[in-house]
């Protein structure tokens, strides 16, 4: 049985991957068991568990504005932490699967392909792209640029002028498990739609909203993904 390590074991995505797993032995250590900001901590845990693959899901994520307010923490966790993970995986010769984001794309025209120009829409996207740079140097790797949100839409208002490719986090977890043996870069997302049209499918009471001009820099305008490659490698 293949053994898989998931960083960020306390996070929702790690818990959902564990919930939907039926074929792998999975380890989801908390930070006190494996700290990605400390290279030796990662190496020690990998040697102890003898895993074949690591899904790197640990990250500083939302609110996205914190990546401007907490620059040092954003760099320490998302860039340096990811670099440590890549170094550990390369030294111990195991595969890394990196959970990235659709925010590495410019967020202007949408329908972004894996080969498209990268210009992160916000500081969070830059921090995740910094992690991608390290992962890309290691050939035994897979980068997943995912557009996902909580299964229960977390807000009372959804934007009508924000186009994206939202996918429920539980669905993303299922797909990740199906791509364990793939390499390269793959976009993961749902059908292109406004945030409002996505949210109202699950909450009829959701209210319409418009992104304030002073907050557009945090989200972009159209961050939708082209998922043809995903469809070609996985029946989706």
Image (tube, rainbow, N blue to C red):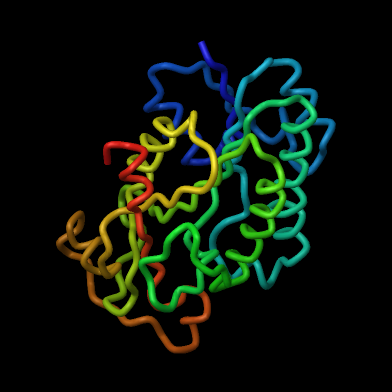
In depth, the one of 105 and 21 nearer the eye is 105
Measuring 60% from the left and 64% from the top, which residue is drawn there? 124
In the depicted structure, whether residue 217 falls above or below residue 68? below
In the depicted structure, whether residue 124 falls above or below residue 89? below
Q: Position of residue 47 (x, y in %)?
A: 76, 18
Left or right, 60 with respect to 204, comes to right
Residue 156 image-quadrant placement? bottom left
Q: Position of residue 75 (x, y in %)?
A: 74, 59
Measuring 62% from the left and 57% from the top, which residue is drawn there? 128
Q: In the displayed image of the protein, which residue is found farthest to the top?
A: 1
Residue 157 image-quadrant placement? bottom left
Left or right, 116 with respect to 133, comes to left
Left or right, 220 with respect to 196, comes to right
Measuring 61% from the left and 31% from the top, which residue is drawn there? 54
Measuring 25% from the left and 66% from the top, which residue is drawn there? 193
Q: Position of residue 203 (x, y in %)?
A: 20, 58
Left or right, 216 with respect to 203, comes to right
């Amino acid at each position: 049985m293949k053994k898989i390590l998931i960083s960020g074991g306390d996070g929702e995505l790690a818990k959902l991957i564990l919930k939907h797993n039926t074929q792998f032995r999975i380890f989801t250590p908390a930070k006190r068991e494996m700290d990605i900001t400390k290279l030796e901590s990662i190496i020690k845990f990998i040697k102890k568990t003898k895993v074949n693959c690591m899904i790197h899901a640990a990250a500083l994520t939302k609110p996205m504005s914190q990546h401007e307010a907490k620059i040092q923490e954003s760099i320490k966790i998302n860039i340096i932490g990811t670099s440590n993970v890549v170094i550990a995986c390369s030294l111990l010769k195991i595969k890394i699967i990196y959970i990235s984001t659709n925010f590495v794309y410019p967020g202007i025209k949408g329908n972004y392909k894996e080969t498209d120009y990268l210009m992160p829409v916000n500081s969070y996207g830059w921090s995740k792209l910094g992690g991608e740079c390290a992962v890309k140097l290691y050939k035994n790797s897979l980068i997943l640029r995912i557009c996902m949100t909580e299964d229960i839409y977390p807000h009372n208002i959804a934007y009508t002028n924000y186009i994206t490719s939202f996918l429920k986090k539980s669905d993303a977890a299922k797909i990740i498990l199906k791509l364990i043996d793939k390499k390269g870069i793959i976009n993961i997302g749902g059908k292109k739609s406004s945030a409002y049209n996505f949210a109202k499918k699950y909450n009829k009471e959701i209210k319409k909203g418009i992104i304030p001009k002073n907050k557009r820099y945090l989200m972009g305008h159209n961050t939708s993904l082209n998922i043809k490659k995903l469809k070609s490698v996985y029946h989706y």
